Image: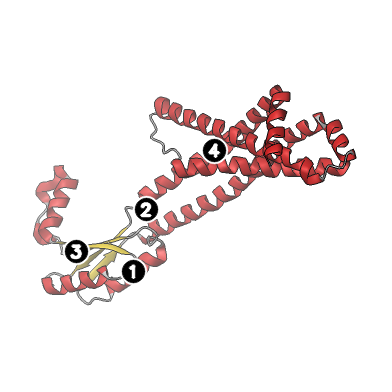
Amino acid sequence: MSLSVREAVVAFRRTPLLSILSITTIAFSLFAFGLFGLVVLNIRKALDTVEARVEIRAFAFDGTDAGSIANAASEIQRLPGVLGVVIITPEEALERAKADMGEFSDVFEASFLPTALEVQLQPGHRDPESVKRVANRLRSFEFIEDVRYGEDWITQLHRIRNIAGATGLVLGLAFAIVAMIIIGATIRMALLARAKEIAIMRLVGATDGFIRRPFLIEGAIKGICGGVVALGLTWVATQVIQHYLAFETVFFDARLAAIGVAAGALIGLLGSAASVNRQLRRV
């Protein structure tokens, strides 16, 4: 293995311009992939922010005793996926209404506002089915007059999330395949430049594994270097967008950044493997 690593390093030194060209090509292909990933990440964040506002509000009939409402709140709190239940009294509802519509605060009276249960749901339990299940349980209480949670809005939000997820997966795979093809092409250039050397190694009895190993290591190293450069370019693009467009964006955390660089190494390895195998069949 140490000999293979040394051969890969020697190959970098022997053809520095070709190596730099390969890394640059890999970096820009992964940069495009990284920008797409950043778009998907920020779309997901925006959807999560909107989804966090999903809640169910149940309104009780006038005159319902506080004990019945408290018991219902306790029961709903124990349902799977429920994050919390807040009892909103008419007085509290009045204060909220005045705060939301200050210029019309003088037209509100607490006597017109019913006691309500405000139910918040846990992340992962805000899909239409989960929300509807909790809403139906609230409707089963005799003292509940009305339950509202924006069913159509939640359905549309869930549909958008599914479409965004499926689109992100398909386009992400497409970008990865394109990056792999580009990396394979750059490795093939290096193979063609050393075709005579490979033929001589085959003549003296070198195995395919021995010949293949330095190129695989070289491809992985180029993938890592390209991944690091692409990560830096993506960060610069993020800063430019935030500075000139005044648009707050989320960048990859350390875990996602490490996964991105590792993906670059894997793509470089797979691209090299495909090119080396093709070249060895021709020698």
Q: Secondary structure at mark 3?
A: strand
Which badge, 2 or 1, is on the more N-terminal residue?
A: 2
Residue 80, x across and y down, in percent = 34, 69
Q: CA distance from mark 3 to mark 1?
A: 21 Å
Disc 1 marks a residue whose amino acid type is Pro
Is 264 above or below relative to 142? above
Q: Which residue is mark 1?
A: 80
Disc 2 marks a residue whose amino acid type is Glu
Disc 3 marks a residue whose amino acid type is Ala
User: Which of pointers 4 and 2 indicates the residue nearer the eye?
Assistant: 4
Q: Secondary structure at mark 2?
A: helix
Q: Which residue is mark 4?
A: 34
Q: Which residue is mark 2?
A: 51
Q: Is residue 45 visible?
A: yes
- The number of numbered badges drawn on the structure is 4
User: Which of pointers 3 and 1 indicates the residue nearer the eye?
Assistant: 1
Disc 4 marks a residue whose amino acid type is Gly
Q: CA distance from mark 2 to mark 1?
A: 18 Å
Which badge, 4 or 1, is on the more N-terminal residue?
A: 4
- Point 87% across, 36% down: residue: 199
**By what rule are the colours in the image chosen?**
secondary structure
Q: Is residue 6 left or right of residue 139?
A: right
Q: Which residue is mark 3?
A: 116
Q: CA distance from mark 4 to mark 2?
A: 25 Å
Q: CA distance from mark 4 to mark 3?
A: 46 Å
Front in this rendered view, residue 81 or 277: 277
The extreme right residue here reads 203
Is 1 above or below relative to 59? above
Q: Is residue 278 left or right of residue 160?
A: right
Which badge, 3 or 1, is on the more N-terminal residue?
A: 1
Is 42 above or below relative to 116? above
Which badge, 3 or 2, is on the more N-terminal residue?
A: 2
